[in-house]
Each structure stands twice: as C-alpha cells, then as structure tokens.
Image (cartoon, grey):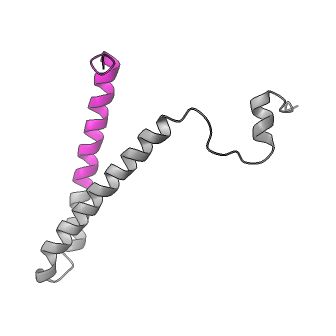
Amino acid sequence: MEFLFSFEGLTALTTLTLLEIVLGIDNIIFVSILVGRLPHSQQGSARTIGLSLALVLRLVFLFFATWIAGLVEPLFTIGPFMGMMEAGECPKAS
C-alpha cells in the first residue's frame, strides 16, 4: 500500500487515470457518431448498450492486464528454441 503513495505510484495512477478519461471520451464520441445514424426511436437504447459494452470490455481488459502482469512463469512456449534460451544454450549469432 505504501507504493501507491510514493512518487512513482502517484505518477502511474495519474497516468492511468488520464488514459482512462481520454479513452472514455473517445468512446462517447465514437458511440455518438454511430448512434446518430440510427432512427431517433433507437438512439437511446443504442447509446446505452454501446456505452455499457464499452465499460464492460474495458473492465475485462483491465482484469486480464492485471492477471498478465502478475504471471511469474510463461503460459506456453513456442518451438524448441524457447527452452534453449531459458537454459542458456541458444547458439550465438555470428
């Protein structure tokens, strides 16, 4: 908890907050442009659905980013060279 109140923690929190605000404004503008093309009777529900989905997807992506940041071991390796790299047996480039 003390990391949050350090200079680095407050800087990271401020940066992430500003990014979320900018992305939220971007979502509002994008949804408003698309909703404006619909008939007037459908605009209210389309705006609600669009902004709700944007919020839910942002929360899902933040959850997965947190989960990925907490990983300490790889989920999978690609090809035989990954094991060689971990063991320090990878051939040197000439």
Left or right position of 44 against 13: left
Q: Where does the C terminus fall, quadrant-wise?
A: top right
Tell me: residue 63, above or below residue 15.
below
Residue bounds of the magenta highlight: 1-26
Main secondary structure type of the part rendered in magenta: helix
User: In the picture shown, does residue 82 fall above or below 37?
Assistant: above
Left of 37 or right of it: where is 73? right
Please state, as top left, top right, bottom left or bottom right, where the N terminus lies in the image.
top left
Q: Which residue is depicted at the point 70% across and 45% down?
A: 77
Query: Percent position (x, y) of residue 50?
Result: 25, 66
Asked if residue 78 is among those painted magenta in the image, a careful observer would answer no
Q: Residue at x 22, y 61 (%)?
A: 51
Task: Give the quarter of the image for residue 18.
Answer: top left
Find residue 81 and report its horizontal and vertical position in percent: 80, 41
Q: Please give the name of the residue rendered at 26% of the width and 30% of the height, measured from the top-left corner.
A: 14
Residue drawn 45% across the image and 41% down it: 67
Residue 2 x %, y %: 30, 16
Examine the image and state in which quarter residue 55 appears. bottom left
Foreground residue, 92 or 33?
92
* Magenta run includes residue 20: yes
Q: Is residue 84 left or right of residue 28?
A: right
* 17 vs 56, nearest the viewer: 56
Residue 62: x, y in percent?
A: 37, 45
Query: For this rendering, which residue is in front, 67 or 53?
Result: 67
Relative vertical location of residue 93 with respect to residue 58 in this rendering, above or below: above
Determine whether, in the image, residue 14 is placed left or right of residue 47. right
